[in-house]
Amino acid sequence: MNKVGTQPNIIGRVSLWQLFWTFFKTGLFTFGGGYAMISILEEELVSKRKWLTSQDMLDMLVIAESTPGVIAVNTATSVGYRLRGVLGAVIATLGVVLPSFAIITALSFVINQFADNTWYKAAFTGVQACVTVLVLNAFIKMFCQLERGWFSALMVAAAFDISLFTDFNVIYIILTGGALGIVYTLIVDAVGKKKSAALLSEQLLSDSEKDDSLPKNGGDK
Amino acid sequence: MIYLELFWEYFKVGLFTIGGGYAMLPLVTQIVSKHGWLTDRQLIEFIGVAESTPGPFAINLATFVGNTVGSTTRLGVWGGLLGALVATVAVVLPSLVIIIVVTLLFDKFRSNRYVKGALKGIRPVVVGLILCSVFTVAAKVVLPDFDFKHLSSDGASQFNWISLIIIFAFVPLSQIKIKGKKIHPICLILLSALLGVVIFGAFGVRQ
């Protein structure tokens, strides 16, 4: 199996129950959009169980964000599939969805009063502050996984600005990012080739100058 | 057959929205009013509830809409349960199939020059989106009326400085290590809930 990044001996050894339980906890403690769960998943999957690396996490987020659907579900499916195949994908998704399903269904008749309760509101105001910090930590962790350099920094800043201050659809931002990435890579490759070609010819030149006694093409000694 | 309709509509929501739960909202609003499943007021009220109850926002919403629609059938409570199940499964199903296919393709083509290049651009974009989320979540807590998309000074009136202090307290708290281990994020959430109850509940500080 050439599953990338993860140690191959771990894949297939993760029990379905562990997978379910991890994502059940994650689903239970996710509030609002899916980003707060990154911190919990980092702790559970990367630090504690070492099933994945942070780089794997970033790549799964990339997949989750650029495909249709709920990000939390996409992430669960992606991780589950990587660790235990199709069944793993189903089990992880079930785990992340079940808390929502159970809580909303069980409280369906009183859910509005429940959320309006003074004490619940007070607790939730506290939780919101914590969620902010968890998303911040997720950002720092994922930022550290990026390739260093001006290009990455610029792309982060641009995506941040555009998504915060404008109504552009996320998919256009992602598509533009992908296109710019391709252009950047092609330019870097082209420049790199020219440079190395220039370097090579320089070397050949200096080599042939050095040992004048040898016939031409003294470079291949 | 109302369940079939529910399934089909939510399947489309799961299939056609990119960008997570909040991106689904316009489409959900549209289908709900088209079929007369929920009143606008019901929907707006529940959006607030879905944000504050555990679980991903979009799944909470799907379960609620399904439950409400199902409850109107002759099956009563069981109908509600069935409706919730149908809507949730429908919204999740496209993800399941698409992600598996994309992951397969991703592993196959990730060493391709163009895919590599595209990833070089998309990775920082996703990180930028997470940073954006830091700001929107923080604003929701500290400046509830503030809107980044329509900047004006009106929103600055409701400044929740206590939440800001909690945020600043939790930044170092989430980094300190006890016996070489950081505090588990779930413990941090529970702690923050407790703090919220004490500060905003027991002491009645304005939220």
Image (tube, coloured by chain):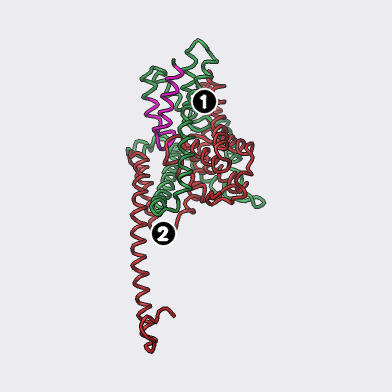
How far apart are the two marked residues, 1 and 2, measured between alpha carbons? 46 Å
Chain of residue at mark 1: A
Q: Secondary structure at mark 1?
A: helix
What chain is colored green? B
Residue at label 1? A115
Residue shown at 38% from the left, 37% from the top: B146
Q: B102 or B139: which is nearer to us? A: B102
Tag 1: amino acid: Ala
Q: Quadrant of residue B204?
A: top right
Residue at label 2? A149
Farthest-out residue, top: B74
Chain of residue at mark 2: A
Q: Quadrant of residue B158?
A: top left
Farthest-out residue, front: A215
Q: How many marks?
A: 2
Farthest-out residue, bottom: A213
Give the answer, above or below, for where B13 lies relative to A154: above
Q: Is residue A181 left or right of residue A22?
A: left
Is residue B162 at least partly visible in the picture? Answer: no
- Specify which label sits upstream in the sequence, 1 or 2: 1
* Disc 2 residue crowd, few under 14, some 14–19, many 20+, Cα 10 Å: few
The stretch drawn in magenta includes residue B26:
yes
Q: Which residues are magenta?
A: B2-29
